[in-house]
Image: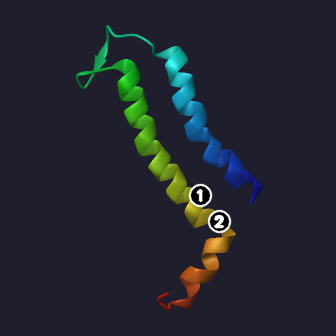
Amino acid sequence: MRHLGWLAAIPFIGILGGAFLFNRVAPLVLGMPVLLAWIVLWILLTAAIMALVYRLDPANRESRGEGTAR
């Protein structure tokens, strides 16, 4: 359970790290400044990481295995 907390902290670190590394306007990625593209990337990665945290959390395994709707 402890490793899930660190896994959930990765998006926070990723978004903040990009502000210091990619604070430029000149290069564009898909028509967006690099920093905006970095933030959009981390929004998508955050959804994937939180889905992984949900699947790995032992508290969620009980309700999935029963097969009854709540």
Please, what is the three-letter code of the amino acid marked with disc 2? Asp
Q: Which residue is at a point 76% across and 54% down the rendered structure image?
A: 2
Q: Is residue 66 left or right of residue 28?
A: right
Q: Which residue is mark 2?
A: 57
Q: Is residue 44 above or below residue 27?
A: below
Q: Which mark is residue 15?
A: none
Q: Which residue is mark 1?
A: 53
Where is residue 23 drawn, in percent x and y? 45, 13
User: Toward the viewer: 70 or 41?
Assistant: 70
Q: Are marks 1 and 2 in contact (CB under 8 Å)?
A: yes
Q: Is residue 67 above or below residue 32?
A: below
Q: Is residue 60 above or below residue 25?
A: below
Q: Which residue is at a point 46% across and 16% down the rendered structure image?
A: 22
Give the colour scheme of this rendering: rainbow
Where is residue 17 drawn, in percent x and y? 57, 24
Quarter of the image with the N terminus in it: bottom right
Where is residue 50 drawn, in percent x and y? 53, 54
Q: CA distance from mark 1 to mark 2?
A: 6 Å
Q: Is residue 41 left or right of residue 6?
A: left
Please identify the residue farthest to the left as the structure is shown: 31
User: Toward the viewer: 19 or 49?
Assistant: 19
SS type, badge 1: helix
SS type, badge 2: loop
Q: Which residue is at a point 32% across and 7% down the rendered structure image?
A: 26
Q: Is residue 43 left or right of residue 64?
A: left
